[in-house]
Image (cartoon, coloured by chain):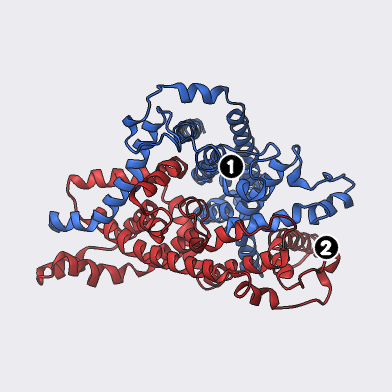
């Protein structure tokens, strides 16, 4: 029973949806387009649909423009930080969810406190601390402070609380120790939450700029976002290479996004509905 | 549960170390050096080994025109972006909340900018905003004269250009949160309203909006905490020039880039900290009061 009025409404709806979609993905498509243009070619809008198409910009990134090293650094740092968070957030979350000691209230307060504290406050002191301890301008400064975070703890804690403790109790009766229970029984049960956590940590750290920028001064230690931000030449900007580098930075995010959409969404919304 | 105290301690040790070393210590440390004149040349690690100057940093900040400008710009940024972002995000959520063909594609597309690296987005928009770029072209087509040197090189447009980009980038993220909120509203409420002959507009204002309040509060709070700390886009796109410096940019600039005045920058960071805290509390109170009045 499609009336004329409804058809009109549907057409209008899809038109609106499409216009919004164009606005949202247009700039990203533009990045892809420019990354395939030849260097020296005008990147004016008129060339949007011209036939020029080359992959040399991408090859250049790993030869004369040194983006290989930042890419390696990003992969290294993000892998270490993600693994650290999976392990340490899980351990702390488990303690919070299952060990009912008085001291745990204090533990919970520390998590909530840091959850609410804006990160800008530690810019200067963290820089000075890293200088003082000698980890400034090393991989340690990019990894150590970020190995466990309150949001992750909170997320996993909420998940563990939904698991009935009967299996753990049974294991305890059978004589399993706390470590065995933690890693052999609870951890496998927490896989969905840990996947959500891993993806969130991956996104934040892969895209992170501020701290990797201020805690390191050596070109060889730049992560990809830092290298890209500082790449903008001094005179004319080399857009083709810059956008090719940006594409490299975006592709892992896109891949994870397309395969893990559900986990990403649940990671984002977990805090909002629990209110 | 009867896990031992020792394992409880062992399990939470990584967090306790991170908490005390990389969060609690910096927090206290930065508060203390905010009362000293410590800078790159005089810097001593122990706060009390530096010259104690009381509230002088805070007093100086309040008469520092660069700081006042960054404060003003931060407020323009926060109050200019948040209402727009929230409304657009809600409208987008309503657009894609019901089932229809291709919904997944639209949702994914809308969300895409918010998981892309801020640096990459900023670089793309430097290109779009430049002289003769995309946005200038659109302006010309609409009959508006774009700034001669591009949007990021003009005192009248630089900050607003960054704000527009920020809105574009973050609406998808808040759309997802609103979608989760919409999903949590029981379908029966609408069915009952339908039976009683309530128009869709009436349904929106009497059911959807009131029930979305907790979600909207969540959106407002996290968005304002994030927006008060805007830095990366300013750093990449304008370097705080053309009247676009914000507070965190000021902290970075005076603390770690040009002057290396650690004490002064820490004091500025604490002022922002207090502003964010006050702001969050106000949002909570306002929302709670309105909710009881309903």
Q: Subunit of mark 2?
A: A
Q: Specify the label residue B163 is tagged with.
A: none
Residue drawn at (57%, 61%) of the image: A227
Residue drawn at (76%, 67%) of the image: A2
Q: Is residue A118 visible?
A: no
Q: Secondary structure at mark 2?
A: loop
In depth, the one of A252 and A261 nearer the eye is: A252
Residue B244, x across and y down, in percent: 66, 39
Q: Secondary structure at mark 1?
A: helix
Image-quadrant location for residue A82: bottom left
| Left or right: B9 in relation to B225 | left
Residue B16, x across and y down, in percent: 27, 50
Residue identified by numbered label 2: A44
In depth, the one of B260 and A102 nearer the eye is: B260
Residue B231, x across and y down, in percent: 57, 45
Residue A225, x across and y down, in percent: 56, 60
Q: Specify the label residue B206 is tagged with.
A: 1
In depth, the one of B205 and B48 nearer the eye is: B48
Query: Could you say which chain is coloured red in the image?
Result: A
Compared with residue A169, is residue A100 higher up or lower down, i.e. above or below?
above
Q: Residues within 10 Å of mark 1 (few under 14, many from 20)?
A: few
Query: Could you say which chain is coloured blue in the image?
Result: B
């Amino acid at each position: 029973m499609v009336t004329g009025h409804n058809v009109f409404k549907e057409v209008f709806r899809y038109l609106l949806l499409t216009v919004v979609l164009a606005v949202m993905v247009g700039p990203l498509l533009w990045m892809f387009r420019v990354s395939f243009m030849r260097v020296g070619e005008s990147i004016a809008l008129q060339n949007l649909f011209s036939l020029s198409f080359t992959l040399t910009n991408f090859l250049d990134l790993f030869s004369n423009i040194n983006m290989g090293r930042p890419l390696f650094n990003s992969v290294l740092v993000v892998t270490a930080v993600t693994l650290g968070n999976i392990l340490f957030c899980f351990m702390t979350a488990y303690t919070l969810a299952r060990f009912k000691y008085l001291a745990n209230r204090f533990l919970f307060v520390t998590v909530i406190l840091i959850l609410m504290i804006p990160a800008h406050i530690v810019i200067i002191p963290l820089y000075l601390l890293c200088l003082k301890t000698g980890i400034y301008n090393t991989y340690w400064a990019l990894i150590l402070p970020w190995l466990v975070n309150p949001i992750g703890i909170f997320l996993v804690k909420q998940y563990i609380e939904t698991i009935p403790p009967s299996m753990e109790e049974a294991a305890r009766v059978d004589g399993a120790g706390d470590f065995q229970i933690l890693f052999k029984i609870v951890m496998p049960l927490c896989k969905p939450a840990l996947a959500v956590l891993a993806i969130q940590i991956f996104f934040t750290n892969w895209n992170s700029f501020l701290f990797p920028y201020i805690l390191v001064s050596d070109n060889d230690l730049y992560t990809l976002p830092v290298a890209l931000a500082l790449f903008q030449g001094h005179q004319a900007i080399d857009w083709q290479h810059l956008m090719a580098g940006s594409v490299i930075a975006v592709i892992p995010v896109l891949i994870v996004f397309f395969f893990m959409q559900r986990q990403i969404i649940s990671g984002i919304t977990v805090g909002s509905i629990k209110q | 549960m009867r896990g031992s105290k020792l394992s409880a301690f062992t399990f939470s040790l990584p967090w306790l170390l991170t908490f005390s070393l990389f969060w609690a210590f910096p927090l206290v440390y930065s508060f203390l050096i905010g009362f000293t004149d410590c800078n790159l040349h005089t810097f001593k690690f122990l706060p009390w080994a530096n010259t104690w100057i009381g509230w002088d940093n805070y007093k100086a900040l309040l008469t520092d025109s660069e700081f006042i400008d960054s404060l003003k710009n931060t407020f323009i940024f926060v109050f200019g972006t948040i209402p727009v972002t929230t409304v657009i995000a809600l409208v987008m959520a309503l657009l894609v909340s019901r089932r229809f063909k291709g919904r997944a594609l639209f949702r994914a597309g809308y969300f895409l900018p918010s998981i892309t690296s801020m640096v990459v987005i900023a670089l793309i928009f430097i290109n779009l905003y430049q002289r003769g770029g995309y946005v200038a072209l659109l302006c010309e087509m609409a009959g508006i004269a774009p700034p001669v040197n591009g949007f990021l090189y003009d005192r009248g447009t630089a900050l607003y250009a960054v704000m527009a980009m920020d809105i574009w980038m973050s609406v998808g993220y808040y759309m997802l949160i609103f979608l989760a909120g919409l999903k949590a509203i029981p379908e029966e409420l609408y069915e009952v309203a339908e039976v009683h002959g309530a128009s869709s507009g009436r349904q929106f204002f009497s059911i959807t909006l009131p029930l979305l309040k907790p979600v909207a509060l969540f959106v407002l709070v996290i968005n304002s905490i994030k927006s008060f700390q805007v830095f990366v886009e300013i750093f990449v796109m304008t370097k705080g020039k053309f009247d676009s410096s914000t507070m965190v940019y000021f902290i970075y600039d005076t603390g770690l880039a040009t002057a290396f005045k650690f004490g002064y920058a820490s004091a500025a960071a604490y002022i922002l900290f207090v502003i964010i805290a006050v702001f969050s509390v106000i949002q909570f109170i306002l929302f709670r009061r309105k909710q009881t009045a309903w």
